[in-house]
Amino acid sequence: MANPNQFAKADALYFDDLHVGQRFVSDTHLIDEEQIKAFAKQFDPQPFHLDAEAAKDTLFKGLVASGWHTAAISMRLLVGSGLPIAGGIVGAGGEIAWPKPTRPGSILQVESEIVELRPSRSHPDRGVATIRSETRNQLGEIVQVFIAKLIVPRRANGPFPTRAPSVAS
């Protein structure tokens, strides 16, 4: 069954289409031990990401995915099915937290909400959308919170804020 949030380029949303409180839900991704170890081997080679036996003696008490792996999966879910922003997901800053670890067998899904919209004063062809995205596992536990400021284009024929005329002295 297709996710109702899956979108084609024609369905992409512009700044003018967005509103505070608007929500989006991505498809899901099953993460397994092999994915965790492969990512860790290349990008975050720590024992609790690489070796299930060694991980038992760590803070995590077992193998866990790197937070950056969780972030990468979350981004893939947002781009593929969770946040249909025209022009792509272009970040201008953000804040990330991992309140719980991602473990092998987790099924991840991202739920996003628009929390603020601010038209750009210096670039009337775009605005900044602040989006709160929570990545949850199959138990509903939040494994990542990402609050991002995204640059979102306005429609070419959409309403643009007017600029005050400059006063020459």
Image (cartoon, rainbow, N blue to C red):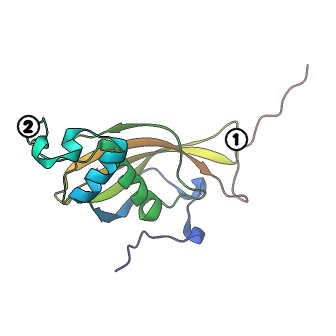
Q: As drawn, is 88 to the left or to the right of 61?
A: right
- Between the residue at mark 1 and the residue at mark 2, the CA separation in whole angstroms equals 53 Å
Residue located 67% across and 58% down the image? 155
Q: Tag 1's secondary structure?
A: loop
Which residue position holds label 1? 123
Q: Is residue 108 visible?
A: yes
Residue located 13% across and 40% down the image? 60
Q: Taking 33 as reference, is 55 above or below it?
A: above
Closer to us: 8 or 130: 8
Closer to us: 40 or 10: 40
Q: Quadrant of the N terminus?
A: bottom left
What residue type is disc 1 on?
His
Q: Taking 115 as reference, is 24 above or below it?
A: below
Residue located 56% across and 59% down the image? 17
Q: Picture coordinates of residue 145 (x, y %)?
A: 32, 43
Seen as rendered, the residue at the extreme top is 169
Q: Tag 2's secondary structure?
A: loop
Q: Quadrant of the C terminus?
A: top right
Q: Picture coordinates of residue 53 (x, y %)?
A: 10, 46
Assess whether mark 2 and mark 1 are in contact (beta carbons under 8 angstroms). no
Q: Picture coordinates of residue 121 (x, y %)?
A: 67, 37
What residue type is disc 2 on?
Asp
Q: Is residue 101 visible?
A: no
Q: Which mark is residue 57?
A: 2
